[in-house]
Amino acid sequence: MFDNKIYVIGLSNAKKITESICKSLKIKPINATISKFADGEIMVRPESSVRNRSITIVQSISKPVNENLMELLIAIDAVKRASAKDINVVITYYAYARQDRKTNGREPITSKLIARLLETAGATRVTVVDIHSDQTQGFFEIPFDNIKSSKMLVTEAIKKINKKNLVVVSPDYGGIKRSRNIANFLQTSLAILDKRRPRPNEAEIMNVLGDVEGKDCLIVDDMVDTGGTIVAAAKLLKAKKAKTVTFVATHAILSDPATKNLTEAVKNNYLNNIYVSNTVSSVYERKIPSLHIVDIGPYLANIIKIYYSVGISLSKIYDAFKMPKK
């Protein structure tokens, strides 16, 4: 008998978002036993038969990165060896994506390495959320979708901002394309921060290209790690007499000292509001003032539905987002 039902397995670093996805799909997730040997080796075993079924595995490859990556690879292998029909892997946060090219001699390209590992394990489709660099899709030889969530987050953030006085700000030159798309979506102007990164997790904001004086600034980025870059950006924008600064980022990695940096920035009125998604589950444990967490589970559920449909484009999901009313 042909089975077109949706089967979802949520791994240990994606429990909450998997619950949200399954609630929207009106299904129950397939439980999986995840255990460890005394030396730390991981074992994953689905508790229900997956034979000849299309399986979706959800995981966030965030801290602890290597452990969660191995758990995902082992889960894919387990499902493949249990004769699953195909395996769609939904990675809410794709680690190692920042190492997507060689900038100096003897450097690895880990983004491609992860792609090869996923394919070798047995994934037949990979879906990620707001990958750091679009060129990552070229590292895959299987179907790959990079799901954009910026419009969804911005739609929430714009509710507290006067759109007539708004300017979208790109945090660096690499984010210009993303920020320009948002500026076009909101039908507003664009400013660009001149950022240089002398070392990993360190950034210098040199200048602002564009008019921000008296404006409500909306900074759009794909991730926030230690928070140093965004705090420096917010300080410079306020020094340039910006009225308010709102920050939107998909992935709230929030490595130390991010909580301290962002909390101080809000208390000192450099940042007025922060909007992030729940792609990284540890965000729920953070106590940062003016931090708003947007659940993208229902959004991903609609994406997964399309994978079980025929002739329906993902553009239908993106087109559902309309420009916020004034």
Image: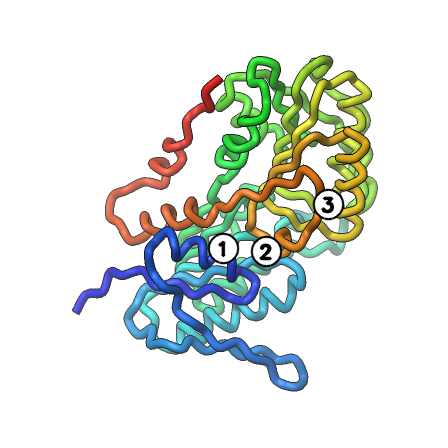
Could you give the CA–CA distance between mark 1 and mark 2, rounded to whole angstroms?
8 Å
Q: Are marks 1 and 2 in contact (CB under 8 Å)?
A: yes
Q: Residue furthest bottom?
A: 38
- The amino acid type of the residue labelled 1 equals Ile
Q: Is residue 27 above or below residue 176?
A: below
Give percent across and percent down for residue 42. Answer: 58, 78
- The amino acid type of the residue labelled 2 equals Ser
Give percent across and percent down for residue 35. Answer: 56, 79
Q: How is the image coloured?
A: rainbow
Report the residue marked by disc 1.
17
Q: Name the front one of labels 3 and 1.
A: 1
Report the residue marked by disc 2.
281
Crowding around mark 2 (Cα neighbors within 10 Å: few <14, some 14 to 19, many 20+) is many
> Residue shown at 55%/48% (left/top)?
136
Q: Is residue 313 above or below residue 7?
A: above
> Residue shown at 36%/76% (left/top)?
48
> Residue shown at 16%/69% (left/top)?
1
Q: Is residue 88 above or below residue 30?
A: above
Badge 1 element: helix
Crowding around mark 1 (Cα neighbors within 10 Å: few <14, some 14 to 19, many 20+) is many
- The amino acid type of the residue labelled 3 equals Thr
Give percent across and percent down for residue 302. Answer: 36, 46
Report the residue marked by disc 3.
103
Residue 133 appears in which quarter of the rendering? Answer: top right
